[in-house]
Image (cartoon, helix red, strand yellow):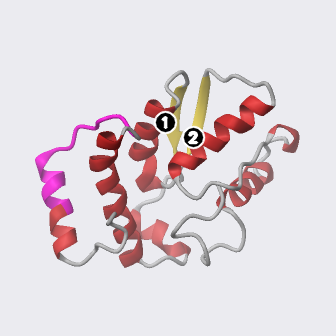
Amino acid sequence: GGFGNWTEGVFERPEAQLISERAIDLGLPREIVMTESNATNTGENIKYSKALLESKGMKIKRAIAIQKPYMERRAHASLTKQWSDVEWQITSPQLDFNAYCQGGISKALVTEIMVGDFQRILEYPKRGFQTEQFVDDKVRAAYAFLIKKGFDGHLMK
């Protein structure tokens, strides 16, 4: 995708360009890389990627979605709802929280984003954007605790 609400001003170029360049650097042939750089949210990522493939006459059966470590579950819930005829594998950089936060984004901001993404896991099935996900009561309690502690900057209004 392009610039989202947390990447505008953080990255110099759209996320999709950065990821595709890294994949090419790691050996993926440039001629098979397609990049969609207009999306500003997960739903648009899916919609525009589907349209890109369709415009090239491509129909996929299996795909790998690369996401941020804390977005894997939400990505899976979105993809299985909005692009259900594809068998999805979701992956992300295998980093722990401390390593992930060394990339220039503060731990507080990453926590706020994670809390907001978790809210979307709870709320988006009601809006038809994602499949329903089981959420343990302990996880719900941790979510409420983080909101009480002020990590609410990425919550939906």
Residue drawn at x 31%, y 63% as measured from the top left = 115
In the rendered view, does 110 fall on the left or right side of 68? left
In three-dimensional space, the C-alpha distance between marks 1 and 2, rounded to whole angstroms, equals: 9 Å
- Indicate the amino acid at tag 1: Leu
Residue 38 lies in quadrant: bottom right
Based on the displayed image, in which of its 4 quarters is residue 17 positioned?
bottom right
Q: Is residue 126 on the magenta stretch? A: no
Indicate the quadrant containing the C terminus: top left, top right, bottom left or bottom right. Answer: bottom left
Quick check: 77 left or right of 10?
left
Mark 1–mark 2 CB contact (< 8 Å): yes
Instruction: Answer left or right for 129 relative to 143.
Output: right
The x, y position of residue 44, in whole percent, is 57, 48
Residue lying at 13% horizontally and 52% vertically, measured from the top left: 138
The residue singled out by tag 1 in the image is 79
**What residue type is disc 2 on?**
Ala
**SS label for mark 2:** strand
Residue beneath label 2, please? Answer: 65
- Packing grade of label 2 (10 A; few <14, some 14-19, many >=20) is some
Which quarter of the rendered picture does the N terminus lie within?
A: bottom right
Q: What range of the chain is rendered magenta? A: 130-143
Check disc 1: other Cα within 10 Å, few if <14, some if 14-19, many if 20+.
Answer: many
Nearer the viewer's eye, disc 1 or disc 2?
1
Residue 14 is drawn in which quadrant?
bottom right
Q: Nearer the viewer, residue 22 or 15?
A: 15
Whether residue 95 sits left or right of residue 62 in the image: it is: left
Total numbered labels: 2
Across and down, in percent, residue 29 comes to: 84, 41
Residue 142 is inside the magenta segment: yes
Q: Earlier in the sequence, mark 1 or mark 2?
A: 2
Query: Looking at the image, is 84 positioned above or below residue 105?
Result: above
Label 1: element kind = helix
> Which percent across, then down, holds residue 22?
73, 56
